[in-house]
Image (tube, helix red, strand yellow):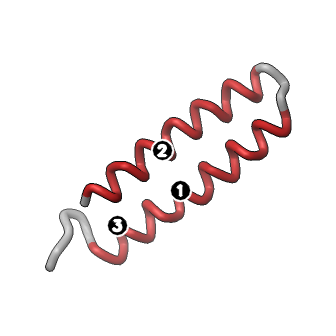
Amino acid sequence: MGLVIILALVTVLSLVGTLKTLKDKNFIGAGFGFASVVTFGWFVIMTVLNNGYPPTH
């Protein structure tokens, strides 16, 4: 469960960073930020779907 929380926080912070870099018109940073949001967001979604929330053992 800790992994989902950490990855969700990283996803949210990546989204904030992406929006800030878009505001500053830094498109390379925005691209890397968007890639981070997609990657970590996918890990969060698939971990929740695979293990359930709350996790079942």
Give the class, few, some or many, for how many residues have Cα within 10 Å of label 3's Cα (few <14, many ≥20): some
Residue at image location 48% in from the left, 64% down from the top: 43
Residue 22 against residue 44 in the figure, above or below: above
The secondary structure type at the circle numbered 3 is helix
Q: Secondary structure at mark 1?
A: helix
Measured from the top left, where is residue 57 in percent x and y? 14, 79
Task: Bin the neighbour count of mark 2 within 10 Å (Cα to Cα): few under 14, some 14-19, many 20 and up.
Answer: some
Which residue lies at the image location 69% right of the left edge and 53% below the top edge? 35
Q: Give the CA separation, mark 1 to mark 3.
A: 12 Å
- The circle drawn on residue 40 is 1
Tell me the residue that label 2 is attached to. 10
Residue 1 horizontal side relative to residue 23, left or right: left
Q: Is residue 48 left or right of residue 20?
A: left
**Location of residue 30 (image quadrant):** top right
Q: Residue 36 location in percent, x, y?
A: 63, 50
Count the marks: how many?
3
Of labels 1 and 3, earlier in sequence is: 1
Q: Dot 3 corresponds to which residue? A: 48
Q: Position of residue 33 (x, y in %)?
A: 68, 42
Extreme residue toward the left, this view: 57
Query: Marks 2 and 3, Cα distance to the nearest angstrom?
Result: 15 Å
Extreme residue toward the top, this view: 24
Three-letter amino acid code at the position of disc 3: Val
Q: Amino acid at mark 1?
A: Phe
Percent across and percent down for residue 51 are 28, 74
| 19 sits to left or right of 3 | right
Residue 23 lies, with reference to residue 18, above or below; the image says above
The answer to whether the residues at label 1 and label 2 have Cβ atoms under 8 Å apart is yes
The residue carrying pointer 1 sits among few (fewer than 14), some (14 to 19) or many (20 or more) residues within 10 Å by Cα, namely many
Q: Name the residue type under label 2.
A: Val
Which tag is nearer the camera, tag 1 or tag 3? 1
